[in-house]
Amino acid sequence: MATNKNAVLRYNTLDKCFSNFGRKYYFDDLVEEVNRALFDFDQGSAGIKTRQLRDDIRFMKSEAGYCAPIVAYPDGKKAFYRYEDKNFSINKRPLNQNEAEQIKRAVSILQRFEGAPEFEWVNELGPMLTTRFGLSPSSQKSMSFESNIDYSGYNRILPLFNAIEKSGYSRFDTNRLTKKNIQ
């Protein structure tokens, strides 16, 4: 998926246009709609040009993208664009492997702070995201926090956690960890 910060906004705007069977969206109309959405999001946006729109459509059609059934229907000297399947939408598609991995990593990072006093909301967020996106839950927790106002050494938690995760040890065999394994 494209890493441009406005890519998702462009894809969703195009998805709305391609899904609208009550209007014919010609290429210039698509550029105009995408630029309107970009300007509504950020008034300083310069918008997109023809080449960017062609790249976006190509990506949406590709396997790396959404496998969108976008068809150009000839209409005189021009062609209008829409989905071949009236029920298709990029938002109805299940997550692809890459998106699922990104969400798993994000949930894993958030769960590192589970139990920390200022991160109570993480206790609910991790399971909710895991359930919502149909991800398999994390195997087991490597570490948990307890609230302690006299706590020191917070700067050592992240390296220790990463070492435990990288080593593949579970909480039951952390006694096998040595200084050599952690480095």
Image (cartoon, rainbow, N blue to C red):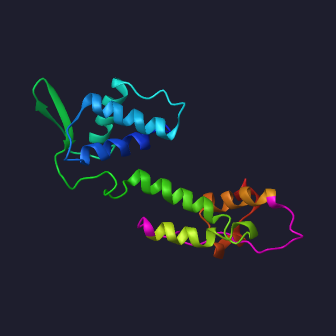
Q: Residue furthest right?
A: 150
**Residue 125 sits above or below residue 91 on the image:** below
Relative image position of residue 124 (x, y in whole percent):
58, 72
Q: Position of residue 83 (x, y in %)?
A: 20, 45
* Left or right placement of residue 103 versus residue 118 in this view: left
Q: Which residues are magenta?
A: 132-154
Q: Position of residue 150 (x, y in %)?
A: 90, 70
Is residue 127 within the magenta segment?
no
Left or right of residue 133, residue 60 in this image: left
Q: Which quadrant: the N terminus?
A: top left
Q: Is residue 136 visible?
A: no
Left or right of 147, for residue 168: left
Q: Where does residue 159 sit, x and y in percent of width and height?
A: 73, 55
User: What residue is shown at x 48% (from left), y 68% (from top)?
Assistant: 130
Main SS of the magenta part reads: loop
Quadrant of the rendered structure where residue 87 is?
Answer: bottom left
Q: Is residue 51 above or below residue 168?
A: above
At 33% from the left edge and 30% from the top edge, which residue is drawn? 31
Q: Residue at x 68, y 69 (%)?
A: 143
